[in-house]
């Protein structure tokens, strides 16, 4: 049986009921099923969520996680506040949601997330750079790739950073794909 901390209040009864049901999940699959049921409620109430997101008791993590795949302006506004949250798990959920977007604002937020102190957030942002390929990410990707700390503690992130650098520098093609046969 999964346990989770009690959800805060969004101030929207229907949404609060769905959030509270997450605490009744009996397995990881059941939890994900309940998150799937939460998504349409979150999308339907995004305007109210934008208004109350900064309240202390607001259930940020579940709301952010349920926004994965949602790319509306209000959703990105919520994600931008989530990526700046003091809690690393809220930032992680926001980075996962932003990584599924393809807007200039979401890309800029992920480039900034390359500097995050959380390896969870940084890892998601680095992986997203392989798909998004913004030139503005190169300086921070190079720092990550050269970091002894990252090389020791997050070698997968370093490998992803090196791949992202190569893709950005070579217009999306790995260097071995550009070589002509002899």
Image (cartoon, grey):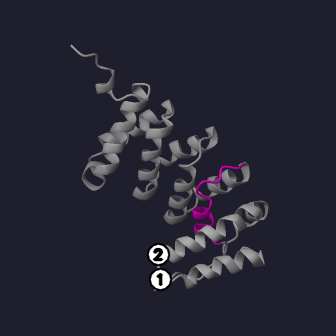
Q: Nearer the viewer, residue 170 or 182?
A: 182
Dots 2 and 1: beta carbons under 8 Å?
Answer: yes
Whole-percent x and y of residue 158?
32, 45
Residue that mark 2 sits on = 28
Q: Based on the displayed image, in which of its 4 quarters is residue 82 positioned? A: bottom right
Q: Per the image, is 161 magenta?
A: no
Relative vertical location of residue 112 with respect to residue 26 in this rendering, above or below: above
Q: What is the distance, in whole Å, between disc 2 and disc 1 at their CAs?
A: 7 Å
The structure residue drawn at horizontal position 40% and vertical position 56%, both measured from the top left corner, is: 119
Mark 2 vs 1, N-terminal side: 1
Q: Which tag is nearer the camera, tag 2 or tag 1?
A: 2
**Location of mark 1 (residue):** 2
Residue name at image x 76 percent, y 63 percent: 44
**Residue 136, relative to residue 65: is it above or below?**
above
Left or right, 138 with reference to 101: left
Q: Is residue 122 above or below residue 58?
A: above
Say above or below: 5 vs 68: below
Q: Position of residue 98 (x, y in %)?
A: 57, 50
Q: Is residue 71 visible?
A: yes
Where on the picture, by quarter, is residue 54? bottom right
Crowding around mark 2 (Cα neighbors within 10 Å: few <14, some 14 to 19, many 20+) is: few
The residue at the point 47 percent across, 48 percent down is 125
Residue at 60 percent of width and 67 percent of height: 36
Residue 67 painted magenta: yes
Residue 32 locus on image (x, y percent): 53, 70
In the image shown, does 70 or 104 lie closer to the viewer? 70
Residue 126 lies left or right of residue 81; in this view the side is left
Taking 181 as reference, is 33 left or right? right
Number of marks: 2
Secondary structure at badge 1 equals: loop
Residue 68, image x, y percentages: 58, 57
Which span is picked out in magenta? 59-72
């Amino acid at each position: 049986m999964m346990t989770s901390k009690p959800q805060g209040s969004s101030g929207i009864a229907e949404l609060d009921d769905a959030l509270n049901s997450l605490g009744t999940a009996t397995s990881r699959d059941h939890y994900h099923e309940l998150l799937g049921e939460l998504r349409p409620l979150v999308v339907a109430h995004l305007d109210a969520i934008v208004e109350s997101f900064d309240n202390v008791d607001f259930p940020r993590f579940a709301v952010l996680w349920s926004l994965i795949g949602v790319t509306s302006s209000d959703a990105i506004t919520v994600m931008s506040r989530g990526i700046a949250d003091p809690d690393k798990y809220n930032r992680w959920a926001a980075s996962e949601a932003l990584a599924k977007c393809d807007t200039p604002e979401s890309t800029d937020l992920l480039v900034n997330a390359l500097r995050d102190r959380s390896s969870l957030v940084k890892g998601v942002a680095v992986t997203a750079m392989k798909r998004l390929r913004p030139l503005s990410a190169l300086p921070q990707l190079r720092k990550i790739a050269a970091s002894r700390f990252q090389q020791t503690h997050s070698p997968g992130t370093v490998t992803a950073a090196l791949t992202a650098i190569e893709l950005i520098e070579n217009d999306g093609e790995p260097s071995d794909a550009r070589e002509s046969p002899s």
